[in-house]
Amino acid sequence: MQIKIARDYQEMSKLAADIIADFIKAKPSGVLGLATGSTPLGLYEELVERHQEGLDFSKVTTFNLDEYYGLHAEHPASYHYYMHEHLFKHLNVPKERINIPDGANTDAASECRSYEDKITAAGGIDLQILGIGTNGHIGFNEPGAPFGGTTSLVNLALATIEANSRFFDKPEDVPRQAISMGIKSIMNSRKIVLLANGESKADAIARAVEGPVTEGLPASVLQLHPDCTFILDQQAAKKLTHSRR
Ligand code: F6R
């Protein structure tokens, strides 16, 4: 696992955008795995700028990590909506190459199976972008999620529901479940870049990088990935031992 520590959020976002831009230039038809949440917003702004400067996404295929279960794509708190607003409406990724789990599919099991099938049919994910929860979750694989898990309907941890309530009018509106790529689906990606900023992530980062590899801290599994880079700001890195910084 490689650790890069950026001066601040903006530099973290630029470093991640550099990795994606280099990847797309080298493999224009590459498959990108994408995350939502606050962390990648700066990265997505950077990618929009780079597209305006000529970076071509017309052959790229994307897969998002997750979607709330029970929300329609048009719901303003859905990850479909988020991705459209922050990224896809500004880029030239063809609609048919954009993949996000359908949280409105009442047959969750078939949605999960077909999502995995689509990833396989696309040749697997080349470059997966991740954020991390304060409890160490990746995607919506909460502590205790099996390392062998593929895309499935998952229950959100209370900490996640509370953290995400900022995007909803009322706490009772926050979905309790999501469809998420599993740890195994994530680990199958050829390259992984995890982004984290802010002090609230420092504990989870220190445990993910330096703690034991355990299902109790899902991100710790990334220690076993052959090509994984963490890009952190100073705050998120502050609980790493000095030799790491
Ligand atoms: C989002 C996702 C989550 C977030 C994590 C951090 O698609 O899968 O794992 O990356 O909850 O969220 P933020 O960035 O809002 O702190």
Image (cartoon, rainbow, N blue to C red):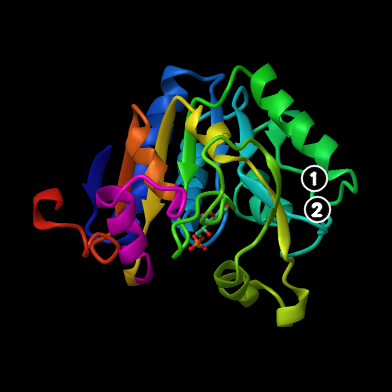
Q: Is mark 2 within 8 Å of ligand 1?
A: no
Q: What label does residue 22 carry, if any?
A: none
The x and y percentages for residue 48 are 52, 45
Q: Is residue 48 magenta?
A: no
> Where does label 1 land, which residue?
102
Lower position in the chain sequence, tag 1 or tag 2: 2
Q: Is residue 217 magenta?
A: yes
The x and y percentages for residue 167 are 65, 72
Q: Main secondary structure of the magenta part?
A: helix
**Image side of residue 142 versus residue 211, left or right:** right
Q: Residues within 10 Å of mark 1 (few under 14, many from 20)?
A: many
Q: Give the magenta part as a residue range.
A: 200-218
Residue lying furthest right = 106
> Is residue 9 depicted above or below 180 in this figure?
below
The x and y percentages for residue 69 are 77, 55
Q: Residues within 10 Å of mark 2 (few under 14, many from 20)?
A: many
**Image side of residue 54 versus residue 105, left or right:** left
In front: 177, or 32?
A: 177
Q: Quadrant of residue 8?
A: bottom left
Q: In percent of the image, x 37 and y 47: which residue is there? A: 220
> Where does label 2 land, which residue?
73
In the image, what residue type sits under mark 1? Asp
> Is residue 209 depicted above or below 222 in this figure?
below
In the image, what residue type sits under mark 2? Ala
Tag 2's secondary structure?
loop
Mark 1–mark 2 contact, CB under 8 Å? yes
Q: In percent of the image, x 43 and y 22: which residue is there? A: 25
Q: Quadrant of the N terminus?
A: top left
In front: 25, or 52?
A: 25
In front: 72, or 144?
A: 144
Q: In percent of the image, x 56 and y 19: which residue is there? A: 29
**Foreground tag (1 vs 2):** 1
